[in-house]
Each structure stands twice: as C-alpha cells, then as structure tokens.
Amino acid sequence: MDLGLGGKIALVAAASRGLGRAVAEELAREGAHLVICARGADALRETAAAIRAETGVKVAEVVADLSDPSGVARVTECALADFGRVDILVTNSGGPPAGPFESHSAQAWQAAVQQNLHSVVELSRAVLPGMKERRWGRIINVTSIAVKQPVDGLILSNSVRAAVTGFARTLANEVATFGITVNNVMPGYTRTQRVEDLAQRNASLHGSTPDAERAKWEGQIPMARLGEPAEFAAMVAFLASERASYTTGASIPVDGGWIRSLL
C-alpha cells in the first residue's frame, strides 16, 4: 500500500527512543523527511544518524524540552527554516511519574500538565496556520489506553492524557474543513523503557520481580504478549497517510485487545 508520504515533512516529538523513535523510523521508511526532538542530545544524534543511514531521508534534530514554550518555539522554527513547512505533527512525551494521588504535589501536577498537555496545545498552535493555508495536515497525538480504562497508580497520566483527548476531539471538528485530521493513538503495554520502569516500580511495591509484573500484564491482554513499538508506529503512519483522509477525531487503541469497553 502506498501511503503517499513521500516528500512529506513530519515533526515527531520525543523521538530519540521508544514509541517516538519507532514512529520516526516508520515515517522515514515511507519517504517522509523528519524534524525530531528530545531532551537528550546523544541519543537524539544517534537516532537521527541511524535513520539517515537506513532510509536516506533528510532528518533535522533539535534538542528541546517541550514542557518549556521556548523548546516548542525552537523545534518549530527549525522545521520552518529547514523545510518550510510541517505536514504531519506527532505529539509525544514521556509519561508523568506513577503513584497514588497523595504522593503528587501541586508542582508535580503542574509539571505533568506542562509536559503532556501544554506541549500538545502549543505544537498544534505552531503548525496549524501553515496546514490551513495548504489545506492539508495531520495531527496525531500519542496518548494512552488509560484515557479509556484508567490504570491504577497512574493518576497523573490518566487525568492529563484524558485532557489531551478532549482537546483533540474538539480541535478535529474545528479544522476538518481545511483537510486537516486530528487523531489520537492509544498505546497499550508495549516493550519500551517506560514499561520496563513501570515493571520495576510495581515489583518493588509488590515484593515481586519485573518478569512477574510483565506476566500479569500479559495475562490481561487477549493476545497474551506485550506490543512492539513497530506495531504501534504502523498505526501512526497509516493515520498520517493519504489513505486516512476521512478519519478524524478518533482515539484508536493499539493494545492487543486490553481495553474491554465497546467504544
């Protein structure tokens, strides 16, 4: 299937590892040029070099903290300077700390909002004028299965990623007539460092082992295994494509069947 991504410009946030890197790699394999960002310079540089070597696309890397408005400005200014436009925006960020309500201060809540909500809002604000002018664009937000079925111990993520869902669903209607789609993709338990860290934390709390914690999750998943980042990235690439032109305002799980709700 030709996804029609050759020559498109994609901005992928938090792309130095995990789901963000998998998405950047998948879009590059489809021929999209990239602007990628992350906070760690070494990992970001290595990712950019690896994608260039494998695919031959142009990759601009920007070290930036997207919880800071100046970081958003730096990334988007680089995209416009190097490529003149952004066709595809993939918002992504690390999950906020785990723990029950009482363990999180007001400052922790504010940090989670800045990292996981404000970054999405400000990145969208920066790219939308150009997308409207060209009457084509894709905004894809990486959220979580927790927005449909909250995960115990992840109150910050459950709350703030649900806010992103509300923002995106409303924005989708506002920009639909400009040929711009806005969708969310909800990863389930996927083999990333974030999930490994969560397994370690749960093992410490429960007096078990990370392997035992992963086995618990696998027991909840009808496919009986964790997902792979490339499986998640394939869904994002489809939503970024010409083929997904009539899909907007959706939240799509990539979770092996973990979410049990009908809708």
Image (spheres, helix red, strand yellow):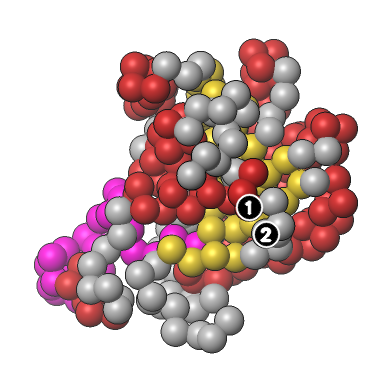
Left of 16 or right of it: where is 12? Answer: right
| Mark 1 element type | helix
**Residue 196 is one of the magenta-drawn residues:** yes
**Residue 233 is one of the magenta-drawn residues:** no
Q: Are marks 1 and 2 in contact (CB under 8 Å)?
A: yes
| Magenta residues, start to end | 186-212
Which residue matches tag 2?
247
Q: Amino acid at mark 2?
A: Thr
Callout 2 environment at 10 Å: few (<14), some (14 to 19), or many (20+)? some
**Is residue 184 at least partly visible in the picture?**
yes
In the rendered image, the vertical position of residue 44 relative to residue 171, given as above or below? above
Q: Which mark is residue 143?
A: none
Secondary structure mostly taken by the magenta-highlighted segment of the chain? helix
Q: Residue at x 27, y 63 (%)?
A: 226
Which residue matches tag 1?
244
Q: Position of residue 89 (x, y in %)?
A: 63, 39
**Which image quadrant is residue 34 in?**
top right
**Is residue 99 at least partly visible in the picture?**
no
